[in-house]
């Protein structure tokens, strides 16, 4: 799922991570591997978001899904894996 810049800001106010900018050179490779998403890096690895099934009434919420783990202590190498939904749900818009 690709988020707007306003949705990214709202998500990052609830989730300690960094969004990878759309103009970053790695984005085409990530899109080839994982599809067209907004990508977030945190202390555990690489994440995307997907629509949350149990969104609170009157809101648009997304669930954080981990797609790669850091493989070194300096957080410079990632190993992709099957998507792992996390328990983190972020409200990105209110109706």
Image (cartoon, rainbow, N blue to C red):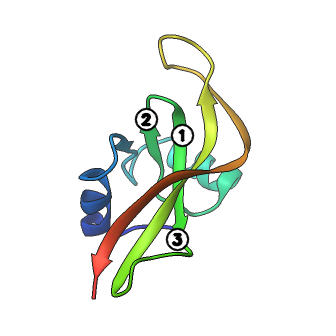
24 w.r.t. 62: above or below: above
User: How far across and down, in percent of the image, does residue 57 sit?
Assistant: 38, 85
- Asked which secondary structure carries label 2, the reply is strand
Q: Label 2 to label 1, Cα distance in Å?
A: 7 Å
User: Mark 1 sits on what residue?
Assistant: 46
Front residue of this view, candidates 15 and 18: 15
- Asked which secondary structure carries label 3, the reply is loop
Q: Which of the two labelled residues, at mark 1 and mark 3, occupies the earlier sequence position?
A: 1
Question: Which residue is located at x 63 percent, y 19 percent?
Answer: 71
Question: Which residue is located at x 41 percent, y 44 percent?
Answer: 24
CB atoms of marks 1 and 3 within 8 Å? no
Front residue of this view, candidates 54 and 66: 54
Q: Label 1 to label 3, Cα distance in Å?
A: 18 Å
Tag of residue 75: none
User: How far across and down, in percent of the image, does residue 61 sit?
Assistant: 42, 72
User: How far across and down, in percent of the image, does residue 78 sit?
Assistant: 61, 28
Front residue of this view, candidates 77 and 26: 77
Residue neighbourhood size for the residue with mark 1, other residues' Cα within 10 Å, grouped as few (<14), some (14–19), many (≥20): many
Q: Which of the two labelled residues, at mark 3 and mark 2, occupies the earlier sequence position?
A: 2
Q: Label 3 to label 2, Cα distance in Å?
A: 20 Å
Tag of residue 52: 3
Tag of residue 42: 2
31 w.r.t. 69: above or below: below
Question: Which residue is located at x 33 percent, y 69 percent?
Answer: 92
């Amino acid at each position: 799922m690709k988020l707007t810049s306003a949705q990214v800001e709202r998500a990052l106010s609830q989730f300690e991570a960094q969004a990878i900018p759309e103009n970053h050179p790695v984005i085409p490779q990530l899109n080839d591997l994982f599809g067209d998403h907004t990508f977030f890096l945190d202390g555990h690895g690489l994440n995307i978001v997907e629509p949350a099934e149990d969104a609170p009434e009157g809101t648009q919420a997304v669930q954080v899904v981990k797609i790669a783990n850091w493989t070194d202590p300096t957080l410079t190498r990632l190993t992709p894996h099957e998507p792992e939904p996390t328990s983190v749900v972020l409200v990105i818009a209110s109706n």
